[in-house]
Each structure stands twice: as structure tokens, then as C-alpha cells.
Image (spheres, rainbow, N blue to C red):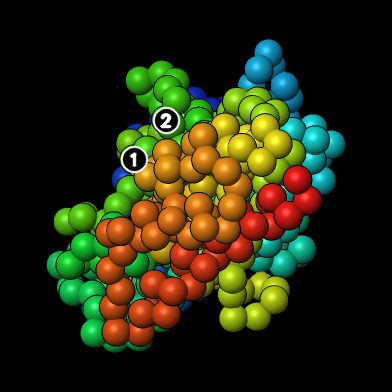
Amino acid sequence: MINFDYVRAASQKAVTDLLGKDPTAKIIAGGTNLVDLMKRGVEAPEKLIDITRLPLGKIEQVDNLVHIGALVPNSELAAHPLIAEKFPLLVQALHAGASPQLRNMATVGGNMMQRTRCTYFYDTVLPCNKRKPGSGCAAIGGHNRMHAIFGASQNCIAVHPSDMCVALAALEAKVMVSGNKGERKILFKDFHRLPGDTPAQDNNLQRGELITGISIPLAERFSKHATYLKVRDRHSYAFALVSVAAALQLDGNKIQDARIAMGGVAHKPWRLYAAEDFLKGKSATTQNFKEAAALAMKDAKAYEGNHFKLTLAPNSIVQALQTITRNI
Ligand code: SF4
């Protein structure tokens, strides 16, 4: 690890000013990913800006939105009565992530900013376009069991590792950010990026911008019939091979609306819009779930080591939808 300066920020403006001035500066809060990356030499910021004293730790309902501060720990978010009542899908996804100790430290903003767990990204000896642009992608033709089946490019086939973000994509959250040009909101679906020609860039934050929180619209019609299914190599403390966040608005056996997103399959949480559209107005039957899953898989492309995801992903979609509708 290299030497670095440490600054404790007293205000949001101080953070955005520091970020604007120093392109190598990084924000630190829980540090559950950044410190690992620094120890391995993947990240080498010359300055760390500690934001843990900023007033970004509230969870509150304002009209038909629930605001969650960027510094709310994952464990606190999962245990909050308002979140448990309004967004059980989010609670399930949070509990599926990491370990209790990590959830105590990891913040909402940090969860969104965590980087891929592609093995080659962490191995500074091997080529990786995300770590060192232009060096190549060791995962293509290498060990790519955990990698993407949607939206990958010839430059990077990594996946985003978060569970929380998959639920937030299905819940149509917005990301609130603050920068030198003011405040703005980014639709969650537009926050993370596909790799394209610039895989080093994980998201659409501009230099100098700070995530201040997220807001989730209340959609009680989806809260009753929702589930987060995570398939992984072991039951705890493992990243998703495939995950599914699914919520249905039901009238008896009839599907009025659907929200489905997947994790472990793309460089960003992957919404299944075609499957959602197909399900609207249909009956909640296994046959319809299978047809929706087949539509969702239309553009999937596997690599040498992850062909199994082409079967696992649609089966997981069907299983999640069956779980939601088991007792209707
Ligand atoms: Fe790097 Fe992406 Fe290739 Fe992994 S998949 S080695 S993160 S460029």
C-alpha cells in the first residue's frame, strides 16, 4: 500500500471541492471494498476523504418517496421498520449480501460504488482493461465462470457484485448526487454502466460528484408479492452466480404489473423489461413464467466457463416467480 493523505470532510461542499481539485482522491466511508483494493495495489489514491461525519445517515418518508442517506449502513437499512414494511424485497437482498460484520460497516453509497470481484481485476500482474485500460482482458479465454452473459464487450465481461443494487433497480430507485454544479438525480437503471470501450468506468458519476442518498418511490402494490433469489456456490458470504429480484402486482391469479431484475449476469443490475411486458395481463402460471424467462434470455451470450448460466438464469427467474405466487 502506498502512503496517502487522510482528510475528514466537514461538509458536502468540502468533499466536492476536494474531489474536483484532486483527480486521484477517493471517498472512504465503511471502506469494505476500497481498503482491500488499496492493500492489493489495485487502487492507489493519494488522498482519502472520510465522509463518515457528514449528515447522510437518515431514513425518512417524504410524501410518496422514501429517502435513504448514503451513509446508512446496510444492516441498519435492512432492520429499519419502514423498509421492512414498504420494501421487503430490499431487505431480502441486503440480507443476501456479504456477512453480518460487513453489513454493519458497508454503507448504501459504498455498496453502489463497490467494484467487480473479477479475479483478474484484483491480480495486478495480469491484463485487465478495467484496472489498466488498454492492457487486455484476461477473463476472455480465462477463468470466467462468474462472468457476464448480458451486455458484455470485447473489452470486459465483468459483473457488478451487489445484491442491494439489483433490488433497487427493480424498485426504480433514484440516486441523489451533489457536485460543484449542484444537485441532480440519476435513475437507478442509468447509474451503473455497461463496459463498452471504457470498462474502467463503472458508473455515470461525474468527477467531483458525491452520492448523497437514494430515493425509492412507494409502490405498495409490489410489496406483498416479491422475492430475492440468490444462487451462489455456498449459502453465505459468496457473490451471486445469478440472482433475481422479482415483484408482481397481482389481482387474484392475474398479473397486473411486474418488476424483475437480475444480478450476477451483467456489468450492471439487469432489468428484464421484455419479460415484464410479457407478463402484464397474463395469468400467474409456470408456463407463462417459462415464456417470460425465455424472452429475458434472448440476447444472452455465454463464455467458455459460464455456459451453465444460460440454464441457471431462466430457471432462477421461473423459481422466483413461482415463489411469489405459491400462496395466492
Ligand atoms: Fe478486467 Fe473486466 Fe476482463 Fe475482468 S472481465 S479481467 S475486470 S477487463
Q: Residue at x 57, y 43 (%)?
A: 283
Q: Position of residue 296 (x, y in %)?
A: 39, 55
Q: Position of residue 229 (x, y in %)?
A: 63, 61
Q: Amino acid at mark 2?
A: Ile
Q: Residue at x 78, y 51 (%)?
A: 327
* Residue placed most toward the observer, 105 or 96: 96
Farthest residue, direction top: 63
Residue 171 visible (yes or no): no
Q: How many marks?
A: 2
Mark 1 burial class by Cα count in 10 Å: few <14, some 14-19, many 20+? few
Q: In terms of image quadrants, where is residue 154?
A: bottom left
Mark 2 burial class by Cα count in 10 Å: few <14, some 14-19, many 20+? some
Q: Position of residue 94 (x, y in %)?
A: 68, 53
Q: Is residue 249 above or below residue 226?
A: above
* Residue placed most toward the observer, 324 or 289: 289
Find disc 1 in the rendering and name its residue.
204
Q: Are marks 1 and 2 in contact (CB under 8 Å)?
A: yes
Residue 267: image tag: none
Q: Is residue 201 above or below residue 253?
A: below
Residue 2 is left or right of residue 110, and the answer is left
Sequence-first disc among 1 and 2? 2
- Please, what secondary structure does the residue beneath circle 1 have? loop
Quadrant containing the C terminus in the rendered view: top right
Residue 235 visible (yes or no): yes
Q: Residue at x 75, y 64 (%)?
A: 101
Q: In 3D space, how far apart are the residues under numbered discs 1 and 2 (Cα atoms)?
A: 9 Å
Find disc 2 in the rendering and name its residue.
186
Q: Amino acid at mark 1?
A: Asn
